[in-house]
Amino acid sequence: MSKGRYGIHGGQYIPETLMNEIHNLEEQYEHYKKDPEFNAELQKLLEEYAGRPSLLYYAKKMTEDLGGAKIYFKREDLNHTGSHKINNVLGQALLAKKMGKTRIIAETGAGQHGVATATAAALLGLECEIFMGKEDTIRQALNVYRMQLLGAKVNAVESGTATLKDAVNECMREWTKRVDDTLYVLGSVMGPHPFPMIVRDFQSVISREARAQILKAEGKLPDVVMACVGGGSNAMGMFYEFIKDESVRLIGCEAAGKGVDTDRTAATIAVGTEGIFHGMKSYFCQDEYGQIAPVYSISAGLDYPGIGPEHAHLHDIGRAEYVPVTDDEAVAAFEYIARTEGIIAAIESSHAVAHLLKLAPTMSKDQIIICCLSGRGDKDVAAIARYKGVDLHE
Amino acid sequence: MSNIQKAFADKKAFIPFLTAGDPNLDKTYEYILQLEKAGAALIEIGIPFSDPIAEGPVIQAANVRALSAGCTTDKVFDMVGKVRQKTDIPLVFLTYLNPVFKYGYERFCARCKEAGIDGLIIPDMPFEEKGELKEIARKYDVDIISLIAPTSKERIETIAKDADGYIYVVSSMGVTGVRSEIKTNVKEIVSHIKAVTDVPVAIGFGINTRAQVQEFWQYADGVIVGSAIVKLIEKYGENAADAIGDYIHQMIS
């Protein structure tokens, strides 16, 4: 069995053409992650460019309104480019540069990872090409233009369901065409080893900071740590340093779309089964013959038929819980947090907020929840308006 | 001698590929027999998959057509069973690991043996991951066909020494699809393989002209042609038999 296993999950299920390069990436990453110079450069970028550490914000009004646990938000939405994606991208783009690559490619769903990748490429002087499902280029047209402004070439992927999974397919195909000068900057804790590990390591800054911040603010660990889950990168980053703290409940909120009892859903843990796809063994939404199911969510960033292998393992061993959240619940939470706290959160993050709204009132006032606000919601305003039947006359 | 070895026994092998269920399984049955009649030594049959990451646009589209027409793994097995009543030609499946995994490795390989499938090509199962399927496949006399790519380098020896059936040398970087020129040093890769194993070597990816076939036949045991044939099926649909026959005659004569 290959390396990069999380229980039975993970592995390196990719074409032979990529194997040497994936081994090279693994070696180079193992080298640079211990290199003081690399770490100092990355730290400087995170602090001076991305704006880290991100705030741990006490949501007093929501806490009072919900009348239960104390609510804190980890404000990844305040990072440069507006989401947690920049944490991983700066790490991988810097790694690409150290490896002597001159070009980076990436998939994107909502466009957050694409924008972050295009940003890092501009900053570090790398050529950049983004693959985005045609459907998503329509849902997130503003982000397409953003990436172009940043100097990236954006390819609209028309194959399959023309969403995130197809963007990943196309990005893998592109990488097999050109590995010498190109690094695939994968955006989530998924794909073949070492990507789930690399992305988790770069995103774990979220929980490293949050753990120290909450200990400083409250003098104790939180009772619940929660985040939305598509592939699962912000959740993995939010969970990671708390995994060893057994008293802390870890909750991932999946996109249930129209509901887990419909076929318009993307809640992989709820409806998926064991499979092998996109380089990894994990859970996937699929039919009895292993055909990957077309999934659906209002959120382009969570509209993915699989979940990262480490999440699959955390689910298997019962260390983390995964709950489905519908479009309707997420949109209601999107509006609630805007009105209550003056924060327009990404529709992805609003899935976690939606579950928080149910959970907090059931907990006592001396308990603490930290919820990751993975991104800002400016990109979603037009889509939410459409969902609500509001004509914006753009 | 295994059925696959027979394909390479006394002449250079021409190996066509087609996607099962494109445009429908009755036609796949007919086209397989036509391919044999036209001179194929072995036939690769694609079980369609929703997300074929090693395929270019032509074969991707064939997968979509086949799945849209209702093709399933069970129906492909039934079709192959019927083909087997007509011919002994070696037959190899090409599909992705998930359809095999989901069907159940044991159940899949047992059905391969029952239907008369001799080998299995799985582009997203590299050497490191074949352990979970290898022994089961051997139990049912199904050869796992190993792929070697232009980037394999020092991996060539490890892969070749463990190979069964034949070795599929990927001629070019990237995905399947017709190429006007193949720039990779395929000859060097083939001679590297030949130095460590007697398992036959077939070259695929991008091949579509008679000149390419003749050139590769000089040093390899077979050539694999996929997209060019799938393109004919795309163009002629249910009436592609003659076009396929003519194309193969022209390629191997």
Image: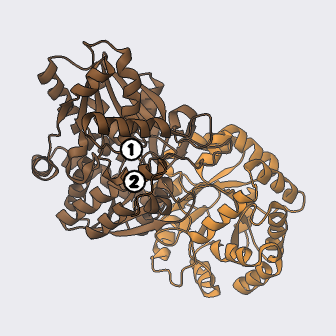
Chain colours: A brown, B orange
The residue nearer to you, when weighing A325 against A333, is A333
- Rendered image: mark on residue A347: 1
Chain letter for mark 2 = A
Note whether A205 is above or below B147 in the view shown: above
Q: Position of residue A318 (x, y in %)?
A: 44, 21
Chain letter for mark 1 = A
The residue nearer to you, when weighing A311 against B29, is A311
Q: Quadrant of residue B203?
A: bottom right
Find numbered disc 1 in the image and state the secondary structure of the residue it sits on.
helix
Q: Is residue A6 visible?
A: no
Q: Is residue B220 left or right of residue A244?
A: right
Q: Which residue is mark 2?
A: A110
Q: Please name the residue shown 32% across and 40% down the image.
A: A234
Q: Is residue B151 left or right of residue B143?
A: left
Note whether B31 is above or below A358 in the view shown: below
Cβ atoms at labels 2 and 1 below 8 Å apart:
yes
